[in-house]
Amino acid sequence: MPKQTAVLLTGGAGYIGTHTALSLVEAGYLPILLDNFSNADPNVVSRLRQLLGVSAFVISPGDACDQGLLGDLFERFEIQAVIHFAALKAVGESVSQPLRYFENNNNALLAVLKAIAAISPDRLIPLVYSSSATVYGDPDQVPISESAPLRPTNPYAWTKVIGEQLILAQQIADPFFRAVILRYFNPVGAHESGLIGEQPQGIPNNLMPYVQQVAVGRREYLAVFGRDWPTPDGTGVRDYLHVMDLAQGHVRAVEYLLAGKCSEIINLGTGTGRSVLELIDAFSQASGREIPYRFTDRRAGDIAVCYADPRKALSLLGWKAERDLASMCADAWRWQSRNPDGYRQVSSAQEA
């Protein structure tokens, strides 16, 4: 039996990392999950083992900022590609703790780039970088293409812009280095098994997990920030993307790079904007529960409309989002209803 191609996932025990690990295994890869569990629950490992088996992936506790550890993993597992997820990600927290965000997010990427450079050109290890649609800020027009101006409005988004610049600079310095920068929009949902999903720390920063917690009774109501945006129903419009579609996008990016293709910057999104009220209605239908909400003032820094032009992803990666909003909500509800307190509670699927 041929040896599996090993792919290192920094921050691999997080929300997107775990779902990407599932897709990588399905595609025949061996995911090596590096995580310090600062933003992930260790209980997720047992859930992954339930879904994949004990030997289908490797979990390596540790910090992505540790260049020595990265180099050791590269050699021990003969890593062929890296997907770099590891980063602090709460926009509001980045505003109150900007230095922490710049230090952590950019130092982790620097460590990865240095570890890759230490091996090149003897062994070429391409990189898939987890960027964000937040780099676009308030766009001039929608849908947003990869050539749109970058206008970050918070420290988190700035860490992603700086990360992209570090990668682009290294591409100039090292002609052997190749990377795909993925700018993705609003990941939501969960694996269809209901065993893994999104578990925010504290009060959720994003809309979908907040709606989920209202539906399951952990929050009294949802605050809708603004009802006078220039949109069809007055609420903000975003591009919601099923996390399993997003995971598949990372697999396609790895395959693209391992085939020797050139570096690229690529949006991952559905290309369709959905309003806050549309999402509330869809989640109410999926859960069979009313989602109480109250309108409040707009938040500083929010924008009216943001959704992707995903044509480049289809052209280069052969990727497009397959799951609709109803599927996103149904899978998110299955996860939340079976795990009202996240990984801290045994799911009904496990009890059965």
Image (cartoon, grey):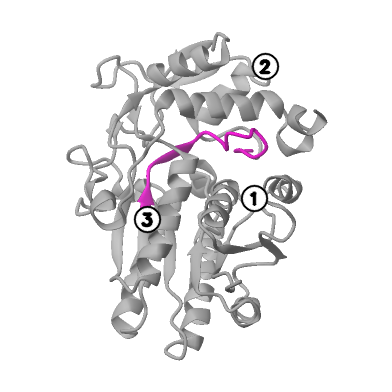
Q: Earlier in the sequence, mark 3 or mark 2?
A: 3
Number of numbered callouts drawn: 3
Q: Earlier in the sequence, mark 1 or mark 3?
A: 1
- Residue 59: x and y in percent read 70, 62
- Judged by depth in the image, the label closer to the viewer, 3 or 2, is 3
Amino acid residing under circle 1: Asn
- Residue 294: x and y in percent read 48, 12
Look at the image and tell me in which quarter the C terminus lies: top right
Give me the C-alpha separation between circle 1 and circle 3.
Answer: 21 Å
Q: Quadrant of residue 67?
A: bottom right
Which span of residues is magenta-colored? 183-200
> Does 349 appear above or below 87?
above
Amino acid residing under circle 3: Leu
| Structural crowding at the residue carrying mark 3, measured as other residues with C-alpha within 10 Å and reported as few (<14), some (14–19) or many (≥20) | many
Residue at the image position 31 percent from the left and 33 percent from the top = 303
- Residue 351: x and y in percent read 82, 30
* Residue 193 part of the magenta-drawn span: yes
Per the picture, the main secondary structure of the magenta-coloured stretch is loop
User: Which numbered marker is on residue 182?
Assistant: 3
Give me the C-alpha separation between circle 3 and circle 2.
Answer: 35 Å
Amino acid residing under circle 2: Gly
Residue at the image position 62 percent from the left and 24 percent from the top = 213
Give me the C-alpha separation between circle 2 and circle 1.
Answer: 23 Å
Is 7 displayed left or right of 33 in the figure? left
- Of helix, strand and loop, which one carries label 1? loop
> Does 92 appear above or below 226?
below
The residue at which mark 2 appears reads as 217
- Of helix, strand and loop, which one carries label 3? strand
